[in-house]
Image: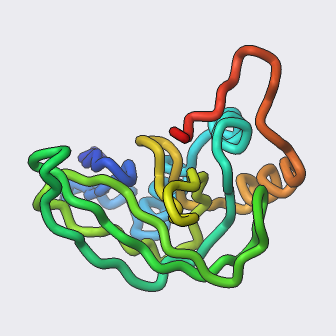
């Protein structure tokens, strides 16, 4: 019988899969494929993210650092990521970006080995940040193709979607 444990951080939903050693039917390849499909965000969420943020891109995470506790939000730290931009979906075309995300103190930054799609807000001095949970996801080929179809989309003015970025 297959089993799975889910770990939720403020940055990623990560599936840690394991198999019962008595079960011969599960293979590492199957588990890896399941894991990749499970935590890629739905296309509907990506569309909302693009509509509600300032910048969206497919990036390759290169490094990360932890910036200590913040008096404004006790028990949280900032994870600051350096990333190479693979493809810009919305916003300026950068070669590299640096962005931050709030995380619970004690959690390590998650440097995915696969490209991720990030939807970010622009803060003070043009700094980029993840506005909340659900704005970063591993990229499947299907999600990348869908993201490309959203190029040029601005913030929706339909009354249902607002820019989530604070000004």
Asked whether 145 or 107 is in front, the reply is 107
Residue that appears at 37% across and 53% down: 11
Q: Is residue 3 among what the camera can see?
A: no
Residue 31: image location, x then y, percent: 42, 60
For residue 133, side relative to residue 51 (left or right): left
Residue that protrudes farthest toward the top in the picture: 159
Q: In the rendered image, which quarter contains the C terminus?
A: top right
For residue 151, side relative to residue 110 (left or right): right
How many numbered badges does the structure rendering display?
0
Q: In the picture, residue 68 is in which quadrant?
A: bottom left
For residue 33, side relative to residue 16 (left or right): right
Residue that appears at 80% across and 50% down: 146
Residue that appears at 61% across and 60% down: 117
Asked whether 35 or 64 is in front, the reply is 64
Q: In the rendered image, which quarter contains the N terminus?
A: top left
Scheme by which the image is coloured: rainbow
Q: Is residue 32 among what the camera can see?
A: yes
Residue that appears at 75% across and 54% down: 142
Residue 39: image location, x then y, percent: 48, 49
Q: In the picture, residue 45 is in which quadrant?
A: top right
Residue 67: image location, x then y, percent: 23, 70
For residue 18, side relative to residue 82 (left or right): left
Asked whether 15 or 23 is in front, the reply is 15
On screen, residue 111 above or below 145 = below
Asked whether 52 or 26 is in front, the reply is 52
Residue 49: image location, x then y, percent: 64, 40
């Amino acid at each position: 019988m297959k089993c799975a444990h889910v770990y939720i951080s403020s940055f990623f939903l990560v599936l840690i899969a394991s198999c019962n050693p008595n079960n011969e039917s599960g293979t590492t390849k199957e588990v890896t494929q399941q894991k990749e499909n499970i935590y890629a965000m739905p296309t509907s969420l990506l569309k909302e993210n693009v509509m509600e943020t300032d910048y969206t891109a497919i990036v390759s995470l290169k490094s990360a650092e932890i910036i200590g506790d913040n008096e404004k939000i006790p028990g949280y730290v900032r994870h600051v990521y350096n990333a190479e931009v693979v493809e810009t979906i919305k916003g300026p075309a950068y070669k590299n970006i640096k962005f931050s995300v709030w995380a619970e103190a004690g959690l390590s930054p998650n440097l995915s080995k696969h490209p991720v799609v990030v939807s970010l807000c622009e803060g003070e001095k043009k700094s980029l940040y993840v506005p909340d949970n659900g704005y970063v996801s591993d990229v499947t080929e299907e999600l990348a193709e869908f993201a490309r179809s959203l190029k040029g989309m601005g913030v929706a003015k339909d009354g249902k979607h607002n820019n989530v970025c604070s000004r």
